[in-house]
Image (cartoon, rainbow, N blue to C red):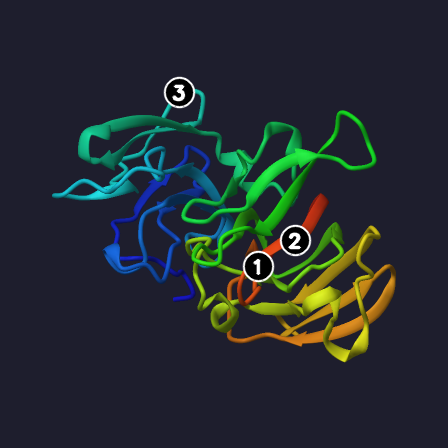
């Protein structure tokens, strides 16, 4: 199967119209539970489980910034979903330790969405940044009242990274509007098909597509993000072709080879690759994605 998971129990429920919804932890590379349970994911199948759409985060561990309990499980898991009279799904979700259980409500058709845009006006509620320092919502330098994501590395002993989920697609287009600041010390952009912690240094190996941005904005092939200037960076991926084409301000700059087989990309990963500190970093003004799903 192409369904990735940590050592965690999944659950399935059949809707009144015959479709199946799956809840599970699409998480890898963390010591606890062979991948962790930081996020709970949902997907929907219209063909009895042959293919799945969504791969969306339906819950994240509300205690993720606290030390794990000394005994027992932790993270969001152990669901027992039921279908309501209105056709939605309700399930208890264990968070472990003193957190007990939460009640989760999922609208199945939400799992069929094929686009998403980031909203930095909600701070960074949509992003996972735990275990890192230097990632924050900041005032836009040019547009009063608007927010951007600022990614710096102020502490050499701490990583700086951010992770964002979007609808899974076998093909798709993701657009970033970003600005590397003068003195930028390097970073990376990754597209992948599973969650791993924001401080995962092995992501460059396991990302489906990985773009390294060198100090002062250098890209593979000689192109460059000019520091202090806003740029549009676009990723067009196609898993059938095992490639992702990258454009900078409308010009082709790279073709990234796909690292392995996959059911589709559903995560954006940003990380500082500075050797020491990077007080300059980069600013992210906008993120949007549109996907095509396998049917």
Q: Which residue is mark 3?
A: 85
Label 2 belongs to which residue?
A: 281
Q: Which mark is residue 272?
A: 1
Look at the numbered discs 2 and 1 and tell me whether their residues touch, using CB distance below 8 Å.
yes
| Number of the front mark, 1 or 3 | 1
Quick check: 113 left or right of 129?
right
Residue 81: x and y, percent? 31, 34
Mark positioned earlier in the residue sequence (2 or 1) = 1
Q: For the point 54% across and 67% down, which residue is it?
A: 275
Task: Tell me residue 273's x, y (percent).
Answer: 56, 64
Image-based side of 219 in relation to 91, left or right: right
Mark 3 neighbour class, 10 Å CA radius: few under 14, some 14 to 19, many 20 or more: few
Which is more toward the observer, 202 or 2? 202
Disc 2 crowd, CA 10 A, few/some/many (<14, 14-19, 20+)? many
Query: Which residue lies most toward the left here?
Result: 71
Report the residue at 56% width, 58% height from top. Answer: 277
- Residue 60 in view of the camera: yes
Residue at mark 1 to residue at mark 3: CA–CA distance: 47 Å
Occupied quadrant, residue 185: bottom right
């Amino acid at each position: 199967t192409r369904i990735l998971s940590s050592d965690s129990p999944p659950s399935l429920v059949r809707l009144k119209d015959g479709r199946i919804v799956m809840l599970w932890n699409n998480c890898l590379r963390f010591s606890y539970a062979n991948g962790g349970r930081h996020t709970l994911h949902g997907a929907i199948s219209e063909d009895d489980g042959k293919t799945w759409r969504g791969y969306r985060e339906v819950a994240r561990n509300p205690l993720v910034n606290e030390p794990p309990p000394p005994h027992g499980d932790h993270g969001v898991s152990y669901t027992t979903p039921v279908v309501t009279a209105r056709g939605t799904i309700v399930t208890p979700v264990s968070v472990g330790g003193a957190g007990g259980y939460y009640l989760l409500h999922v609208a199945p058709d939400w799992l069929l969405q094929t686009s998403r845009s980031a909203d930095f006006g909600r701070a960074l509620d949509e992003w996972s940044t735990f275990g890192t320092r230097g990632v924050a919502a900041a005032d836009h330098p040019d547009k009063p009242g608007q927010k951007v994501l600022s990614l710096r590395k102020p502490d050499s002993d701490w990583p700086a990274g951010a992770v964002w989920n979007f609808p899974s697609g076998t093909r798709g287009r993701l657009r970033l509007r970003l600005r590397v600041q003068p003195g930028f010390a390097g970073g990376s952009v990754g597209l992948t098909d599973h969650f791993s912690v924001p401080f995962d240094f092995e992501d460059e190996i396991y990302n489906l597509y990985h773009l390294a941005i060198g100090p002062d904005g250098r890209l593979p092939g000689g192109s460059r993000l000019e520091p202090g200037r806003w740029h549009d960076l676009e990723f067009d991926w196609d898993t059938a072709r095992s490639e992702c084409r990258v454009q900078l301000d409308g010009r082709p700059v790279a073709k990234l080879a796909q690292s392995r087989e996959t059911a589709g990309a559903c995560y954006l990963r940003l990380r500082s690759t500075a050797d020491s500190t990077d007080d300059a970093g980069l600013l992210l003004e906008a993120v949007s994605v549109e996907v095509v799903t396998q049917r």
